[in-house]
């Protein structure tokens, strides 16, 4: 299926949809648009690979080795970071 320019996915849209893509939650139409964009855009292909690798690496981490104080500090830093965005 050939997509019109209006149907093609922009890089910013791909970034917004990457989680749904990796979870298999995109509609068939959006999945096709996503995959076509990744096939044509080296920057977005690299981004999707980075997200996959980050998920793989973080899933191997265990929080049990952190003290409760360190866990609280990390959570506070993350919340502050998200609040500022």
Image: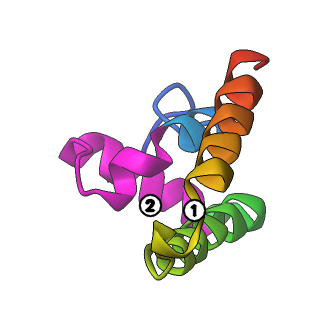
Q: Residues within 10 Å of mark 2 (few under 14, many from 20)?
A: some
Q: Position of residue 60 (x, y in %)?
A: 47, 82
The residue positioned 35% from the left and 46% from the top of the image is 20
Q: Which residue is mark 1?
A: 38
Q: Magenta stretch containing residue 25, yes or no?
A: yes
Question: Alpha-carbon distance for marks 2 and 1?
Answer: 5 Å
Q: Nearer the viewer, residue 19 or 67?
A: 67
User: Mark 1: which secondary structure?
Assistant: helix
User: Mark 2: which secondary structure?
Assistant: helix
The residue positioned 71% from the left and 70% from the top of the image is 46
Q: Nearer the viewer, residue 75 or 52?
A: 75
The residue positioned 45% from the left and 71% from the top of the image is 64
The quarter of the image holding the C terminus is top right
Q: Are marks 2 and 1 in contact (CB under 8 Å)?
A: yes
Q: Position of residue 84 (x, y in %)?
A: 79, 17
Q: Position of residue 25 (x, y in %)?
A: 23, 47
Q: Is residue 56 above or below residue 45?
A: below
Q: Is residue 51 above or below residue 30?
A: below
Q: In the figure, is residue 18 to the left or right of 26? A: right
Q: Which residue is mark 2?
A: 35
Q: In the figure, is residue 85 to the left or right of 34? A: right
The residue positioned 68% from the left and 58% from the top of the image is 44
Q: Nearer the viewer, residue 79 or 16?
A: 79
Q: Is residue 50 above or below residue 29?
A: below
| Stretch of the chain drawn in magenta | 17-39
In this orientation, does residue 6 appear? yes
């Amino acid at each position: 299926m050939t997509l019109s320019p209006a149907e093609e996915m922009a890089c910013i849209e791909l970034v917004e949809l990457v989680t749904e893509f990796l979870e298999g939650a995109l509609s068939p139409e959006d999945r096709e648009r996503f995959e076509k964009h990744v096939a044509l855009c080296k920057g977005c292909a690299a981004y999707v690979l980075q997200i996959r690798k980050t998920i793989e690496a973080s899933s191997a981490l265990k929080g049990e080795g952190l003290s409760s104080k360190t866990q609280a500090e990390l959570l506070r830093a993350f919340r502050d970071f998200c609040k500022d965005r």
